[in-house]
Amino acid sequence: DLCSSLAEQLRKNSRGCRVVLSHYHRTHGQHAAAQAEAEEGPAGDGTFQNFIARAAEMGLTVRAFHEDCLGKQRCSLVEVLLQ
């Protein structure tokens, strides 16, 4: 699992280290449906919300620090840090 691997590596190399990931937001199909059901609101990126929740369980903080659009596709740069 990605969050387990990230947590392990950050704990081994915790001196100011962070992980930077790029993320394409998924707002259609099962990814959006999962979040819309949970929030009873508009469709969003349920897969990304699950990643954030799992990361928190592993003692990690996830923060988007840059967002942009590539055509109609929204993307973000995300940092993952130890809490």
Image (tube, rainbow, N blue to C red):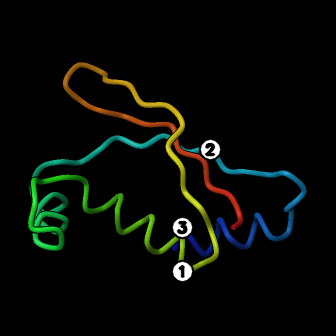
In which quarter of the view is residue 36 placed?
A: bottom left
Near-viewer residue (21 or 83): 83
Please provide percent x and percent y for residue 37.
10, 71
Whole-number angstrom distance, CA of label 2 to CA of label 3: 13 Å
Q: Neighbour class for label 3 at 10 Å: few (<14), some, many (≥20)?
A: few
- Is the C-beta separation of discs 2 and 3 under 8 Å? no
Q: Residue furthest bottom?
A: 57
Q: Position of residue 15 (x, y in %)?
A: 90, 56
Q: Is residue 23 above or below residue 11?
A: above
User: Which one is in front in this view, the residue at disc 2 or the one at disc 3?
Assistant: 2
Q: Which residue is mark 3?
A: 2
Q: Which residue is mark 1?
A: 57
Gap between marks 1 and 3, in whole Å?
A: 12 Å
Residue 6 lies, in percent from the top left, at: 65, 65
Q: Residue at x 29, y 32 (%)?
A: 74
| Label 2: which secondary element | strand
Q: Earlier in the sequence, mark 2 or mark 3?
A: 3
The residue that label 2 is drawn on is 20
- Please report whichever mark, 1 or 3, sits nearer to the chain's N-terminal start: 3
Question: Looking at the image, is mark 1 or mark 3 nearer the viewer?
Answer: 1
Image quarter hosting the C terminus: bottom right
Mark found first going from the N terminus, 2 or 1: 2
Q: Name the residue located 80 percent from the left edge and 52 percent from the top edge.
A: 17
Amino acid type shown at disc 1: Glu
Q: Are marks 1 and 3 in contact (CB under 8 Å)?
A: no
